[in-house]
Image: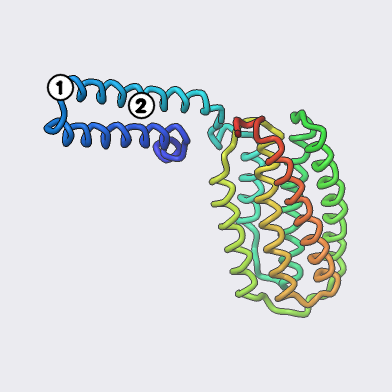
């Protein structure tokens, strides 16, 4: 709870205002010996007035509503996906490991898309979610077919596995740093960017360590498609920042 409070904009603005007031009073004490009581009283009144004005502005600007992560549906879906991926055994050929992991990863994106299609309001976000769901359902089928038919030609690769683990850890931290508002469209866009960034890192890792031409080509297509979707989601967030209290 304390960590959450320390991350909030209210904490920072309040702290800055108090610091401003303390510095002003210190300057006022230094100046008192050089100015008349009447002037010093006026300065004190003006300082308090400025502080109150700043506080009032903060209250007006404090349009950003933050929802605790453990109460947020979209974040819960993201965490469930990551928890499942962390239980995966990485003791196979890198191409197989990648395929198994991306099936779980894609299912997370599908679940997030289902949530925004059910609970979201924005048509543009729903269109992006529909495309993500359609594309990743097809890719899950392709990845499962690959697993069923591929004859592994490599031993487990500890360096590759470490890169995937590092990517998961990074994604965990990055998702937990996001400002989550409870607005389904906004939260989907924020977290899907993090989700896609993780997928891109995984795809680039298998391009380096894998040997399957099919998986390398699929990874290349994933990178291109998800980089484009990240741009679309970023553009939407910038255009709709007022929905989440932005200015």
x and y percentages locating residue 200 in the rendered image:
71, 61
The numbered dot on residue 37 is 1
Q: Is residue 131 above or below residue 98?
A: above
- Report which quarter residue 212 is drawn in: bottom right
**1 or 2: tag closer to the N-terminus:** 1
Up-down relation of residue 156 to residue 38 (above or below): below
Q: Is residue 80 left or right of residue 48?
A: right
Residue 131, image quadrant: top right
- Screen quadrant of the N terminus: top left
Decide if residue 172 is on the left or right side of residue 195. left
| Residue 176 on image: x %, y % | 55, 45
Residue at 56% over, 30% down = 64
**Residue under the point 87% across and 59% down:** 142
Q: Residues within 10 Å of mark 1 (few under 14, many from 20)?
A: few
Q: Is the residue marked by circle 2 packed among few (<14), some (14-19), or many (20+) residues within 10 Å? A: some
Quadrant assignment, res 199: bottom right
User: At which x and y percent is residue 245?
Assistant: 60, 30
Q: How is the image coloured?
A: rainbow
CA–CA distance in space, label 1 to label 2? 21 Å
The residue that disc 2 covers is 51
Between 47 and 92, the residue placed more toward the observer is 47
Asked which secondary structure carries label 1, the reply is helix
Q: Nearer the viewer, residue 234 or 69?
A: 234
The C terminus - image quarter: top right
Tell me the SS state at disc 2: helix
Left or right: residue 37 versus residue 226 is left
Q: Residue sitting at 15 percent across and 22 percent down? A: 37
Q: How many marks?
A: 2
């Amino acid at each position: 709870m304390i960590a959450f409070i320390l991350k909030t904009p209210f904490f920072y603005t309040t702290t800055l205002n108090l610091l401003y007031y303390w510095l002003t009073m210190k300057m006022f004490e230094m100046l008192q010996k050089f100015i008349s009581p009447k002037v010093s009283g006026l300065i004190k009144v003006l300082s308090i007035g400025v502080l109150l004005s700043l506080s009032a502005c903060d209250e007006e600007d404090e349009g950003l509503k933050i929802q605790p992560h453990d109460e947020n549906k979209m974040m819960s879906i993201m965490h469930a996906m990551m928890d499942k991926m962390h239980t995966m055994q990485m003791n196979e050929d890198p191409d197989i490991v990648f395929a198994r992991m991306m099936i779980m990863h894609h299912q997370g994106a599908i679940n997030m898309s289902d949530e925004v299609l059910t609970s979201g309001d924005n048509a543009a976000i729903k269109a992006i979610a529909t495309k993500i769901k359609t594309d990743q359902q097809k890719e899950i089928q392709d990845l499962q077919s690959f697993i069923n038919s591929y004859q592994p030609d490599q031993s487990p690769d500890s360096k590759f596995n470490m890169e995937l683990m590092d990517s998961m850890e990074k994604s965990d931290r990055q998702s937990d740093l996001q400002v989550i508002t409870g607005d389904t469209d906004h939260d989907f866009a924020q977290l899907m960017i993090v989700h896609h960034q993780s997928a891109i890192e995984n795809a680039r890792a298998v391009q380096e360590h894998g040997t399957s031409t099919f998986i390398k080509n699929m990874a290349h297509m994933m990178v291109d498609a998800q980089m484009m979707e990240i741009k679309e989601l970023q553009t939407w967030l910038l255009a709709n920042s007022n929905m989440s209290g932005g200015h």
